[in-house]
Amino acid sequence: MSTSLETLSPCLSICHECDLLNDVPPLPPDGCARCSRCGHILFRNPANCVDRTLALTISAMMLWIVANLFPFLSFGMPGNLVHTNLISGVISLYEQGQTILSIVVLVTSIIAPALQIAGLLYVLAPLSRGRRLPSARRTMRWLGHIKPWSMMEVFLLGILVSMVKLGGMADVIPGVALWAFCCLIVVLSWALSILEPLVLWGQLDRAERVGGPERQ
Ligand SMILES: [Zn+2]
């Protein structure tokens, strides 16, 4: 894998706190640029941020698969143990006439995280080897639009409330998918938090283009 132990080029950056236009000098690896007036952090240059984000994204992909394939919750009633997983919960909501709610759960808890993971892998896997696939920049812009639709935390909160409420009627047993889902929330948020846009766009500019021309 290539590394991003590179010094960021000097640039101009506006402080989001006090609106001062800062003339930022070259930033070494693991350096941090601050506003010269208020001290607000303008951006960082984390070492190996592309490789680290890629490793976390691969972990998130495996967690997403486990979260969707294995039992999410099991309900134990006298003489009966019912297993549910994420997609069967969505289907159950739809069959009960909760069409809009089932679509919201499907989009925010299954599709949006999957698109985030797929988009990050599409851009970062080649970039870690110094290459750039067609439409990589467009993919990163789309990821910015998809991010608000990924609301796994809200879904998890609803599940926890349901577990407490159903606890009096049946034994609610968390499945391996529930733990994977919790880890997925943490790992995906971690991956997105360490990906510094300035470093990413700089590496995309320098990467060797693969395939057809880049579509903006
Ligand atoms: Zn400032």
Image (tube, rainbow, N blue to C red):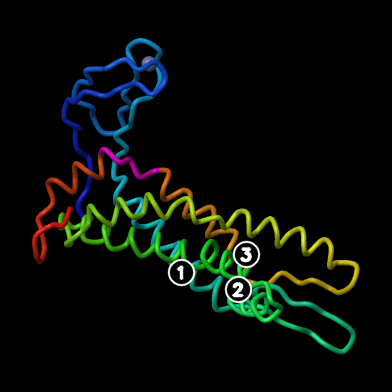
Does label 3 or label 1 sit earlier along the sequence? 1
Quadrant of the snapshot with the N terminus: bottom left
Residue located beneath label 2 in the image:
86
Q: Is residue 208 left or right of residue 159?
A: left
Assign the magenta stretch its main secondary structure.
helix
Q: Residues within 10 Å of mark 1 (few under 14, many from 20)?
A: few
Circle 3 or circle 2, nearest the eye: 2
| Residue appearing at x 30%, y 52% in the figure | 140
Q: Is residue 2 above or below residue 93?
A: above
Residue interval drawn in magenta: 194-198
**Residue type of the residue flagged with mark 3:** Trp
Q: Is residue 172 left or right of residue 156?
A: right
Q: CA distance from mark 1 to mark 2?
A: 15 Å
Q: Is residue 31 left or right of residue 56?
A: left
Q: CA distance from mark 3 to mark 2?
A: 13 Å
**Residue type of the residue flagged with mark 1:** Met
Residue 53 image offset from top left, x and y in percent: 36, 52
Element class at badge 2: helix
Residue 195 colored in magenta in the image: yes
Within 8 Å: ligand 1 and the Cβ of disc 1?
no
Does label 3 or label 2 sit earlier along the sequence? 2
Residue 73 image offset from top left, x and y in percent: 70, 73
In this figure, what is the number of numbered marks? 3
Point out which mark residue 62 bears. Answer: 1
**Residue type of the residue flagged with mark 2:** Leu
Element class at badge 3: helix
The residue at the far bottom in this view is 79
Point out which mark residue 212 bears. Answer: none
Residue located beneath label 3 in the image:
179
The quadrant in which residue 163 appears is bottom right
